[in-house]
Amino acid sequence: MREALRDHKGVDDLDRLLRDGWVVLPGVLDSTEVGRLRAALDPVLVANGRGRTDFEGRSTERVYALLGKCPEVAALAEHPRVLALGDALMEPSYLLSSVQAVRIHAGESAQPLHADDDPGTVGRPRRLHGFSVMWALTDFTEANGATRLVPGSHRKEENTPPAEAAAISATMHAGSALVYLGGIEHGGGAHTGGPARLGVSIIYCQPWLRQFENLMMAVPPATASALPRRVQEMLGYKLLHGVWGSVDGRDPMRLLDRT
């Protein structure tokens, strides 16, 4: 397990993630994989249109429930480099909470800083609720809206406003993955120049939490049956402790087997 958590310099990705709240995994995807995903995502992004609010981004194309519209991204959701971290961080049977494509265009303003695991009703400090991955399918630069992060903010002792002045830009090359804990403050950056910035955002949550997206409705049995088994389980098609998540008293995986 520990070898799967070491980067190309032998440094432990898990240790760095727990210390800083984020880590970049460089060069996880090769150029062929990046090109294939970009080609698959482009028509989905164009068809979906741009955001409706400042948080979504009015100059940003954003696609929700992405697994139901572009199943090619399942390979990202179950990538072994990411799941090695998830298996070390999370309780067994953790779930996918949200899978989105995000393409930021010129003129977009910076997204407000926020923490993915902050529902507004749970104080700090708190146990880990989840973690997120931003897959870079183009280069992420400070000019084109690379994700901003406040290092160490996952260790805050109380719910205070995000420290905008402390935010840094997580720049990375296409094919890299930015992994960050649910408690770290972050947000998309402003796009002030260069080509559009394209990424796939995947959020994982503990098995006892409600997901951001209702993924068992957004990715129904007829669609989910074609996805890899681990991804099916992370969508919610799996019992927790043999009881939670049942359908008519039975394992929801039976719905996929029947399909």
Image: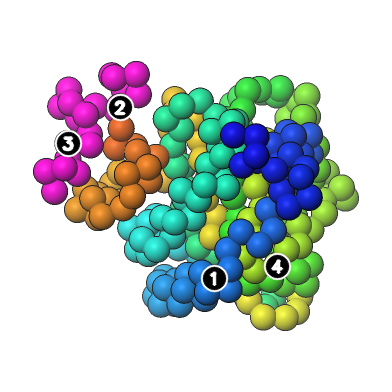
Which residue does the numbered mark 1 point to in the structure image? 34
Give the spatial CA distance, label 2 vs label 1: 34 Å
Give the mark nearer the N terminus: 3 vs 2.
Answer: 2
Question: Residue at the spot x=11%, y=43% of the render?
Answer: 258
Question: Residue at the spot x=73%, y=63% of the render?
Answer: 172
| Kind of residue at disc 4 | His
Instruction: Return the mark for residue 254.
Output: 3
Give the mark nearer the N terminus: 2 vs 1.
Answer: 1
**Most prominent secondary structure in the magenta stretch?**
loop
Question: Residue at the spot x=50%, y=50% of the render?
Answer: 79
Query: Is residue 52 rendered magenta in the image?
Result: no
Whether residue 112 is situated above or below residue 239 in the rendered picture: below
Label 3 secondary element: helix
Residue 116 at what x, y percent from top left?
60, 41
Give the spatial CA distance, label 3 vs label 2: 11 Å
Give the mark nearer the N terminus: 2 vs 4.
Answer: 4
> Horizontally, is 257 left or right of 202 in the view?
left
> Horizontally, is 229 left or right of 56 in the view?
left
> Horizontally, is 214 left or right of 108 in the view?
left
Give the spatial CA distance, label 2 vs label 4: 38 Å
Which residue does the numbered mark 4 point to in the structure image? 173
Is residue 117 visible in the rendered image? The answer is: no
The span shown in magenta is: 239-259
Label 2 secondary element: loop
Label 4 secondary element: loop
Which residue does the numbered mark 2 point to in the structure image? 239
Residue 160 at what x, y percent from top left?
77, 33
Give the spatial CA distance, label 3 vs label 4: 41 Å
